[in-house]
Image: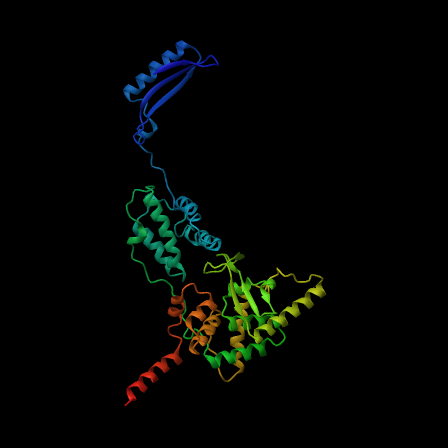
Amino acid sequence: MAITKKKNGKYQVRVYVGYDHITGKRKTKYATCETMREARLKEAQLITDVETGELVPEWDKPKVQQHYTFDEAFEEWFDIYKQQGFTQSTVDKTEQYFKLHLLQPELFGGMYLERMTRKEVQDRVNVFLAKYVTATKMLGYASQVFKYAVDSEHIKCDENPLDHIRKVRPKKAQTRKVKYYNEGQAQLFEAGFNEYYDDKPMYKAVYTVLLRTGMRIGELLGLQWQNVDFANNLLTLNGRMTYLGDGTRKYESGLKNGDGVRVIEIDKVTHNKLKDWHKAQLLEGFKSGTPIQTEDFVFPYARTSITNSFYRFQDWFNKNHEEQLPHLNLHGLRHTHASLLISDGVELKKVAERLGHKDITITANIYADVTPKARREVADKFSEIMAKK
């Protein structure tokens, strides 16, 4: 306790009011008065307030219950999540999951966490699970937010509510009976799209590249003309086109597996289709007065346009040809490329490198069931062994 005269002529009163229970440091209450008499009176008043309990340090005051919402927990959690080294596209997609779904009022938006009950959470979750194929994945992010709120003691709860509810079966994606073309179907497909897109060199180039290189659609759309080496028949992949939750396109440097670059050798057919498309773009640029640049994207189109056109082609082919093609999604062309190589005996390591798989076991696990020719050979080989005398 002390009274000090300051340079401005006023008097400062200092009274110790207790100790911080966390740091152990002594805490002080200050007051400023105009005269010494006022300062002494103020000092006496503060001392009395401390002794009677009228003056209570902030850390000793009982906490007033404040509403803490799921939205507030998300903001705090997301600030930490963004600093964990994820790619920007992953961060953006995660944010879209929350904005478009998890933070909506019908799910967790605006929910007071201290008032929530398992029954209410379960009812909301079960409605949500039945609507979206990716609902389980999105709820995984919501669970991280709940866990953050529990661990940071924002709510008086020792357990994550999503860990203890009974969930209904989530909506399932429609499974395709066939995930890739066999050798004959791949040949039919190539002949078919060359017929269907006879006057559209862009589409012929798109489906030729996807089928004959096995690259991902995001890698295809991130390909720039400066990445195409016609002289050496090489494509250099060093970026990809990603899509946010709202469908917005976004170019990102680097590849999906974390590599900065991957080089793919192309055959003569792919070379010629790309060359035809390049000439068509050069001609169009000359006519419009906007010549193409080396940094321009080879295929400046939306993924949905290419996908929808692919589905239209399959419908057309099966209506106009006796021999039918199974309906695939666009990623099925990548599976086709890999499965045909593996079935024909190409080393798994070489296929993994061409596809851009970081670990050969990824390739092995994905394509374990796409080698009928190899399985037949194994069976025949064992039969030969047993027939030896």
Q: Residue shown at 38%/63% (left/top)?
A: 171
Q: Locate the C terminus and report the quarter of the image it occupies.
A: bottom left
Q: Is residue 277 above or below residue 71?
A: below
The residue sitting at 39% across, 9% down in the picture is 37
Quadrant housing residue 302: bottom right
> Relative to 226, is 77 on the left or the right?
left
> Dividing the picture into quarters, in which one does residue 158 lie?
top left
**Residue 128 vertical position relative to residue 272 in the rendered view, above or below:** above
Expressed as whole percent of the image width and height from the top left, the position of residue 203 reads: 58, 71
Residue 85 visible: yes
**Residue 101 as seen in the image, left or right of residue 269:** left
Q: Residue furthest front?
A: 389
Expressed as whole percent of the image width and height from the top left, the position of residue 18 reads 30, 24
Residue 211 or 229: which is nearer the viewer?
229
Residue 317: x, y in percent? 53, 79
Residue visible at 33% across and 63% down?
A: 169
In this orientation, which residue lies closer to the viewer: 309 or 301?
301
Task: Say whether residue 269 is left or right of residue 34.
Answer: right
Where residue 73 sits, quadrant-wise, is top left
Looking at the image, which residue sits at the far bottom? 389
Quadrant occupied by the N terminus? top left
Between 215 and 384, the one lying in front of the other is 384
> Can the viewer see residue 318 in this picture?
no
User: Where is residue 268 drawn, in percent x and y?
Assistant: 58, 75
Q: Is residue 367 above or below residue 94?
A: below
Q: How is the image coloured?
A: rainbow
